[in-house]
């Protein structure tokens, strides 16, 4: 979404779903994974909305939907592309919106070649290097040299980084456009051509969805979009955990832009992020390639320094044009008085990345003996990450491991009870890893904030002191840093300066010397030149006078009030409830809300009014904080040489983008294609019915002996793993189970690991309801109880019947409720933009009965693999 | 349409301390089967865990209401059209075979039957005429000022008379403890003007708590609304004072026959049969006396 709209985050909030006339939940099992948020979908239904759930399984979400569409896992782009084709083919797009607010009219480089021209790939593919050169994807007339110059986007490109680069845009306008949308090289026509073969028949063939059902969905969306009506999409990891995950979301973005739903009440894309603070974990990032507020992490280039960084990363137009003040204010927050103009504000203290350091890369390196130590905090990769068997094996290669958790989770106990101990692949006495298990405090035992899926920061207050040695992350990191600094005190080495010069002076409170969380929040919210908390990010300067730990959070401590702790009840304020907690940016609840009004500033309809231009007051007003310069008139045209947000016109709502428009076609910010394309999953029983190119040509498949792949499509041996498997969540358990399988009241609700199969598959493989099944892939084999249910349906895909196997992934061998881990079966096969694993679609075989034990287990897996000719 | 004048059996007892009758309206049409109600109840009331293991009965691993389960979420997977009076299938493979799904040349596109997954949170009905209350010899069971039915665990002697008297099989003896336990409608929370734990936890407001009279009105409107939207099968269960227990204090909106949810379609409080039972007993006694007398008279000759 960062690439399409300018910010990577849900465009709306869950309460707004009640305003939708149609909701499509796809790549999400919202009722089970977001039960509290789901009440707003129920509310929408009560108000007459049509709710559609597209999912391989009939789930508790489907039970409350008006229509459930069973779909083959891994084929969503074909489905959504079919909707794009339906919209364009039938002229159902919201024309005025598309024309004014998207880059539909932009003309693309003459050198661009589409997947229709090249049988499934785009121009610029470097097959060996597994990447695309994007010169031919640029807007026609752009200075290609500038946009192709060294960027901070070597390995770090993609969704997490903002996608605002159009290079040199004069007045924010692309050099060549066709307002009539007729030019065959304009985005609109390229879009049409790209999806021309995504017909209802093709959707049926690829997805296993009957034509009539597909058309019902397409029509429901079309008739519930436009001036008077809006539709919303809800998605979650059912979309992101694919080797083309980012492209899934891009396709939905295109649909929503064509239908004119972005920035409007009851519209938008509700990205459902899971963990209570998962959004926060990318805002104040725990990711290797971004800094707070989605600033890119500097790369190790020959030329470096703040000026070079800014030049490379700040487009001249749009709000990202202010990269310099955001960055300088961050550096001042971190290094305080030491950061001065003369030393580039300590820019050189920042580490440089030189390659992919994402989770799977790190674990692969760990297995290859390249890592000494590992901190694992509030995570359980021995169960929760793909190829969890390889995760466990890699842990044994470390010198030391620190695990912070409430319980001795599988990641901490691997050295004595991993399944590999039983098979003999690991021997406790040969494992040299020193494991430190540090007890963690629960959220009720500490102050702090959560940033949830709708960008909402909510404060939580400590209710009790933690017991014994349990401590919060804040305590741990602060005191660890304090002790490291004490050890380094007096050092004369240059390499120690970044640590010693940090501002590390948070006040501590209470018997455990807990750092004052509000002080940290205040630092994140930032201060202006007078040391007053910032009201928002507009006062940020690049002269070192302002500090701000995360520019998008500026304003969360405005007026010296912890805005995130506000709790004004909903019934005492408008339905938007702006005085409950605080959302970034600037407490805006619906992003891009300028688009809820037409180019003249008038709402598209009274029914769907949200933000509008008040000519008398000379400002934007409405239900929410306008996502626009408050006093910029709709007819504003920038002067020559205007910079950053001033360079955008009064009718360009997507203020983060260089051209102020939402991107149907993405020339930058994405590594595997400017337009989403149906590719088969890394492992699938099918070749690609659309193209010769079967799967994503630049996906990250780790070719390693310990990460073997099932043969796919028509590759010989693929019928040894004939079924599609997918993972999912149950309401009763939480992620890798450390917080639910250890609690009796939850463990008893879903006491055992089971697989879900259709009666047809049960019959085909001799599976008994309530009995056992062994599920096997090239990686390993696991066992599960069998749940035969008609909620799983066989589908007819590409002329034959395919079965799907559902696997809830919560189980490991620790706790009250134990079982094998579904993730053991999946490979390291990742989306190249964000390095997320494809855990929602792969292939497997299923055999009745329990799995072998001891060394017989890997022997069995190897036999199946050899029979298939797998193990490449 | 049922009457909305509700019986308040406790009014006479409590006189000035009387409260409006409180109850549950469980609207199963918006239940998402999350079981937050089961967990919240156990947490608040310190009900012990009672693991049943994987039952294989859809997502229901709780089994049924009992001494250690005061809210129970039922899951019914239905592939048949609404209104068929068969009992739910015991085995899904069996059911599939029965419905000819498992055939060669299968055509998965052909099913227009409409798959449904019914979910419903069951609870003690806090009947107007409560069988458990009638049967209790010790007075452990009593009716509160809110017209709910509560067991005092420090008085209960574990005789078990109440267990067989409940038409729904709710109240139950706790193993290892001997006493009976059931939903109290969070009596302690009601006294502090709070709603029961399950009602507070329910994210979709499937469990609604409040004055029973108002709930009955709300429920009637809700059924009308659902009928208007084409959901003819929606109905209330336990809302009528004319039923065999005088109406439920915790009533439901169901989307199928009660039997589908393993609920008795026509529950009757056993004490309604008391006159019959006495009559039958007297009749039997008379017959016995007559028979004995006859045999003696005969014997004299």
Image (tube, rainbow, N blue to C red):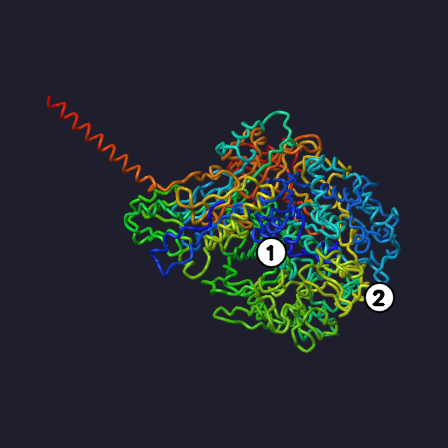
Q: Are marks 1 and 2 on the same chain?
A: yes
Position of residue A25 measured from the top left corner of the image (x, y, whole percent)? 65, 47
Residue A638: image tag: 2
Give the side of residue B294 with respect to residue A240, left or right: left
Position of residue A674 measured from the top left corner of the image (x, y, whole percent)? 78, 49
Closer to viewer: mark 1 or mark 2: 2
> Can residue A372 be seen here?
yes
Give the SS element for disc 1.
loop
Q: Chain of mark 2?
A: A
Q: Which image quadrant: the C terminus of chain B?
A: top left
Measuring 38% from the left and 57% from the top, which residue is drawn there?
B145
Q: Is residue A423 above or below residue B145?
A: above
Q: Chain of mark 1?
A: A
Position of residue A504 measured from the top left corner of the image (x, y, whole percent)? 60, 71
Q: Is residue A241 above or below residue A586?
A: above
In the rendered structure, are the residues bearing label 1 and label 2 in contact, judged by CB atoms less than 8 Å apart?
no
Q: Earlier in the sequence, mark 1 or mark 2?
A: 1
Give the side of residue A369 with respect to residue B44, left or right: right
Position of residue A797 measured from the top left corner of the image (x, y, whole percent)? 69, 33
How far is mark 1 from mark 2, CA to CA? Answer: 54 Å
> Which residue is identified by label 1?
A372
Residue A562: image tag: none
* Depth check, front residue: A531 or A832: A531
Classify 10 Å Cα crowding around label 2: few (below 14), some (14-19), many (20 and above): some
């Amino acid at each position: 979404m960062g690439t399409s709209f300018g910010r990577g985050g849900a465009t709306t909030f869950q309460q707004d779903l009640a305003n939708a006339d149609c909701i499509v939940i796809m790549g999400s099992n919202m009722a089970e994974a977001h039960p509290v948020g789901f009440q707003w979908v129920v509310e929408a239904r009560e108000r007459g909305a049509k709710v559609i759930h597209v999912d391989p399984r009939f789930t508790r979400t489907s039970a409350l939907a008006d229509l459930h569409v069973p779909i083959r896992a891994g084929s969503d782009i074909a489905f959504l592309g079919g909707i794009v084709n339906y919209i364009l083919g039938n002229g159902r797009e919201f024309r005025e919106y598309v024309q004014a607010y998207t880059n539909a009219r932009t003309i693309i480089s003459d050198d661009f070649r589409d997947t229709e021209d090249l049988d499934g790939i785009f121009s610029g593919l470097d097959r060996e290097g597994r990447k695309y050169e994007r010169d031919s994807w640029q807007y026609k007339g752009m200075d290609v040299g500038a946009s192709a110059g060294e960027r901070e986007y070597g390995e770090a490109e993609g969704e997490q980084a903002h996608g605002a680069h159009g290079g040199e845009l004069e007045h924010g306008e692309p050099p060549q456009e066709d307002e009539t949308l007729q030019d065959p090289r304009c985005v609109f026509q390229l879009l049409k051509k790209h999806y021309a073969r995504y017909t209802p028949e093709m959707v049926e063939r690829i997805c296993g969805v009957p034509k009539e059902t597909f058309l019902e969905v397409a029509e429901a969306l079309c008739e519930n979009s436009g001036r008077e009506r809006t539709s919303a999409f809800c998605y979650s990891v059912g979309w992101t955990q694919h080797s083309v995950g980012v492209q899934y979301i891009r396709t939905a973005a295109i649909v929503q832009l064509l239908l004119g739903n972005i920035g409007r009440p009851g519209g938008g894309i509700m990205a459902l992020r899971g963990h209570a603070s998962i959004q926060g974990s990318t805002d104040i990032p725990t990711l290797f390639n971004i800094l707070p507020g989605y600033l890119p992490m500097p790369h190790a280039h020959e030329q470096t320094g703040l000026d070079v960084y800014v030049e490379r990363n700040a487009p001249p137009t749009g709000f990202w044009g202010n990269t310099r003040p955001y960055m300088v204010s961050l550096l001042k927050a971190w290094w305080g008085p030491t950061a001065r103009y003369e030393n580039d504000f300590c820019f050189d203290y920042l580490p440089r990345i030189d390659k992919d350091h994402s989770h799977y890369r790190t674990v692969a390196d760990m297995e290859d003996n390249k890592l000494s130590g590992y901190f694992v905090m509030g995570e359980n990769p021995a169960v929760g990450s793909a190829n969890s068997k390889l995760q466990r094996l890699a842990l044994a290669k470390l010198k030391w491991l620190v695990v912070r958790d409430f319980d001795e989770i599988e990641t901490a106990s691997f050295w004595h009870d991993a399944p590999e101990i039983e098979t003999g692949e690991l021997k406790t006495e040969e494992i040299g890893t020193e494991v430190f298990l540090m007890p963690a405090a629960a959220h009720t035992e500490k102050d702090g904030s959560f940033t949830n899926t709708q960008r909402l920061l909510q404060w939580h207050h400590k209710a009790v002191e933690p017991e014994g040695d349990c401590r919060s992350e804040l305590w741990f990191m602060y005191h660890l840093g304090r002790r490291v600094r004490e050890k380094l005190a007096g050092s004369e080495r240059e390499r120690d300066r970044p640590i010693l010069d940090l501002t590390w002076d948070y006040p501590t409170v209470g018997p455990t010397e807990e750092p004052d969380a509000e002080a940290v929040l205040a630092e994140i919210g930032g201060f202006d030149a007078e040391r007053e908390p910032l009201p928002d990010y507009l006062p940020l300067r690049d002269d070192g006078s302002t500090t701000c730990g995360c520019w998008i959070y500026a304003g969360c401590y405005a007026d010296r009030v912890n805005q995130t702790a506000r709790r004004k009840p909903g019934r005492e304020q408008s339905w938007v409830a702006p005085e409950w907690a605080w959302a970034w940016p600037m407490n805006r609840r619906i992003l891009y809300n300028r688009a809820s009004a037409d180019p003249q500033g008038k709402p598209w309809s009274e029914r769907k009014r949200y933000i509008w231009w008040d000519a008398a007051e000379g400002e934007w007003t409405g239900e929410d904080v306008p996502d626009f310069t408050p006093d910029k008139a709709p007819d504003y045209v920038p002067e020559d040489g205007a910079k950053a947000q001033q360079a955008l016109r009064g009718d360009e709502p997507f203020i983060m983008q260089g051209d102020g428009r939402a991107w149907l076609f993405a020339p930058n910010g994405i590594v595997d294609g400017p337009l989403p394309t149906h590719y088969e999953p890394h492992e699938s029983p099918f070749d690609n019915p659309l193209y010769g190119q079967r799967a994503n040509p630049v996906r990250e498949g780790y070719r390693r002996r310990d990460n073997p792949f099932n043969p796919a499509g028509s590759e010989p041996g693929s019928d040894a793993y004939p079924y599609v498997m997918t993972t999912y969540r149950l309401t009763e358990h939480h992620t890798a189970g450390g917080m639910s399988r250890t609690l009796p009241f939850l463990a008893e609700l879903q006491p055992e690991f089971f697989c879900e199969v259709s009666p047809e598959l049960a019959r085909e493989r001799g599976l008994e309801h309530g009995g056992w099944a062994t599920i096997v892939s090239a990686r390993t084999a696991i066992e599960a109880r069998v749940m035969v249910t008609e909620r799983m349906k066989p589908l007819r895909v590409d002329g034959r019947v395919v079965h799907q196997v559902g696997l809830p992934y919560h189980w490991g061998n620790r706790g009250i409720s134990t079982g094998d881990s579904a993730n053991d079966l999946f490979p390291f096969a990742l989306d190249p933009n964000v390095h997320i694993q494809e855990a929602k679609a792969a292939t497997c075989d299923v055999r009745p009965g329990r799995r072998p034990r001891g060394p017989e287990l890997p022997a069995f897996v190897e036999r199946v693999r050899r029979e298939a000719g797998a193990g490449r | 349409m049922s009457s909305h004048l509700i019986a308040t059996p406790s009014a006479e007892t409590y006189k000035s301390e009387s409260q409006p009758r409180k109850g549950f309206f469980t609207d199963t049409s918006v239940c998402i089967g999350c079981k937050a109600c089961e967990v919240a109840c156990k947490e608040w009331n310190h009900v012990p865990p009672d693991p049943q293991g994987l039952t294989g009965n859809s997502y229901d691993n709780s089994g049924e209401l009992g001494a250690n389960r005061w809210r129970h979420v039922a899951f019914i997977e239905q592939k048949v059209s609404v209104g068929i009076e068969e009992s739910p299938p015991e085995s899904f493979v069996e059911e599939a075979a029965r419905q000819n799904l498992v055939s060669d040349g299968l055509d998965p596109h052909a099913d227009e039957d409409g798959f449904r997954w019914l979910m419903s949170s069951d609870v003690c009905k806090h009947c107007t005429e409560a069988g458990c209350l009638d049967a209790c010899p010790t007075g452990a069971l009593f009716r509160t000022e809110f017209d709910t039915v509560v067991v005092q665990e420090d008085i209960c002697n574990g005789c078990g008379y109440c267990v067989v008297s409940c038409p729904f099989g709710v109240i139950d003896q706790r193993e290892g403890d001997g006493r009976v336990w059931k939903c109290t409608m969070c009596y302690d929370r009601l006294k502090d003007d709070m709603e029961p734990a399950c009602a507070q936890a329910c994210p979709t407001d499937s469990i609604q708590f409040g004055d029973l009279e108002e709930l009955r009105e709300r429920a009637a409107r809700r059924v009308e609304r659902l009928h208007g939207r084409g959901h003819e099968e929606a109905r209330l269960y336990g809302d009528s004072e004319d039923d065999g227990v005088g109406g439920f204090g915790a009533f439901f909106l169901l989307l199928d026959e009660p039997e589908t949810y393993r609920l008795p379609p026509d529950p009757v409080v056993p004490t309604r049969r008391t006159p019959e039972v006495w009559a039958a007993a007297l009749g039997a006694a008379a017959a016995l006396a007559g028979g004995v007398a006859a045999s003696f008279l005969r014997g004299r000759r």
